[in-house]
Amino acid sequence: MLLALLYVGIFLIQLDVTVVNVALPTIRVDLVTSLAGQQWVVAAYMIALASLLLPCGALGDRIGHRRVVLTGLAVFGGASLACGLAPTIELLVAARAVQGIGAALLLPGTLAVITDLYVDSAARARAVGVWSGAGALALPSGPLLGGALVAGLGWRAVFLINLPIIAVGLPLAWRLVPRRQPHQEHPRTRLRISKDFVGPNIIAGLMNFVGLGTVLVLTLYLQEHLSQQAFRAGLELIPLFLPLAVLGPISGRITARYGPRLPMTIGLALGVAGSLCLLGVNDHSGYAAVVPVQLGLGIGMGFLTAAVVHAAIAALPKDRAGFASGVNNTSRQAVGALGIGVYGAVVGHAPGFVSGLHVLAWLGGGLWAVALGITWLTVQGRQSTGQMVRKMVERIR
C-alpha cells in the first residue's frame, strides 16, 4: 500500500506537467489573459519544480523524508485548491508556482522513501522500475484526461481533481511512511562524487534533452504540418508514451537481475535508431512516417529510465538518497527543458519544417550515441556481457 501511495505521488506530479495544456484556451477566455499569461501557467510550475528539486532532496536527507513527503502532499493539495478557485490569471500563476514547490518536495521524497524501504539492490531496482512506469503513464494521460475534464466540467476541474486524491493520500502517508531519519541514527557518510554518479546523471539529462525535444517537434508535426486536432494528436502520440509506462517495470526487473548497463545499452541503441528515423520524413509524408520514430524513442526510454535512475541512486550511500534523487531529477528536468528550447529553435529557424527534422535526426542520434559511450565508461554491470547473453539464451530455451 505504501508503494502504491508513492506511485500515485509521482503520477500526480507528472500529470500536472501536461494536463493543463489542453485547458489553456479556455483559461485565456475565462480569465481574459494573453499568450504570455497562458505560457506562465505552464512555466511557473516547471520553473519552481526544476529549481527546487535539489534543495528539497537534500532537505529530506537532513530532516527525514517522511516530513518532506507529508509537507509536499499538503502544499500540493492546497495549491491545487487555489488553482481551481483562482479568480485572476495572476493568482493562478502564483498558485501554480506553489504547486511546483509541493511537487519539488514530493518527487525526490517518493524516490528516497523507496530507497529507504529496500536494502536489497535488486528489489529496489524493481520498485524504481514501477515508479518510473507510473510517472511515464501520466504523460499520455494528461492531455486525454484534461480534454475530458475541460469538456465536461470546465478548466477548474483540471486542478480540483487532485483534491480527492490528496484527501485520501495524506492520511495514508501519515500512517504508512516510516518514521526514519537515517542521519540521526547513524553518522552521515562522507559525500564522494565519482564517475559512477556523474555518468548516469549526464545520461539522464541527454535522455530528456532528446526525448522531450522530440515530443515537442512531433506534436508540432501532427498539429501544424498535418493539421490534426489536439485530442487526435494526443492519441497519435500513444506509440511513444505507452512503451514508457509498460516497459518501466520490465526495465526494473532486468536491472535487478543483470545490472543497469544492459537495459541502458538496449534503450540508448533503440533511441539512436528512433532519432535517425526522422530522416525518413519528407514534405509528403503522413502519420505513418513518424511511427518508427515514436516506437524507437518510446521503447528506448522505456528500457532506459528506470535503469538510469537506479544507477544514479545506487552510486551514493542510502543516507544521501534524497540528494541523489534531487540531482537526478534536476538533471532530467533542467536539461529536458533545454532540449525543448533547442528543438523548437531548430525547426523554427530551418528553411523548412522537414529540413529541421533532418537536422534533429543527426543531433538526437549523435547525443544518444555519446550517452551510450558514457554508459560503458561509467556504469557497471553485474556480469560481463558474455555472461549476460548466455544467461538470457538459457532462460529463453
Image: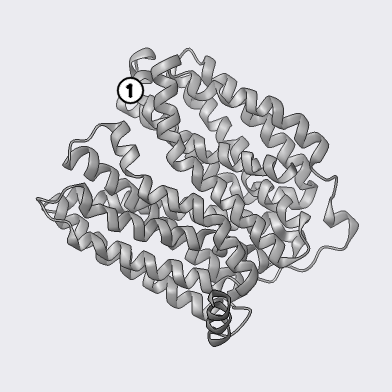
Q: Is residue 37 visible?
A: no
Name the residue at 75% across, 53% down.
Answer: 61
Q: Amino acid at mark 1?
A: Pro
Front in this rendered view, residue 301 or 375: 301
Q: Is residue 384 left or right of residue 182?
A: left
Q: How many marks?
A: 1
* Quadrant in which residue 359 is drawn: bottom left
Colour option used: one colour
Q: Nearer the viewer, residue 65 or 396?
A: 396
Look at the image and tell me whether residue 216 can be seen. yes
Across and down, in percent, residue 45 comes to 50, 35
Q: Secondary structure at mark 1?
A: helix
Whether residue 219 sits left or right of residue 89 in the image: it is left
Q: Name above or below for residue 4 compared with residue 326.
A: above
Q: Residue at x 17, y 41 (%)?
A: 226
The x and y percentages for residue 373 are: 44, 78
Q: Quadrant of the N terminus?
A: top right
Name the foreground residue: 315 vs 330: 315
Q: Would you say 158 lies left or right of 277 here?
A: right
Q: Residue furthest right?
A: 185
Q: Residue at x 55, y 23 (%)?
A: 161
Q: Which residue is mark 1?
A: 25
Residue 345 spot, x, y in % from top left: 25, 50
Please identify the residue farthest to the front as the structure is shown. 397
- Image location (x, y in percent) of residue 168: 71, 27
Left or right of residue 241: residue 190: right
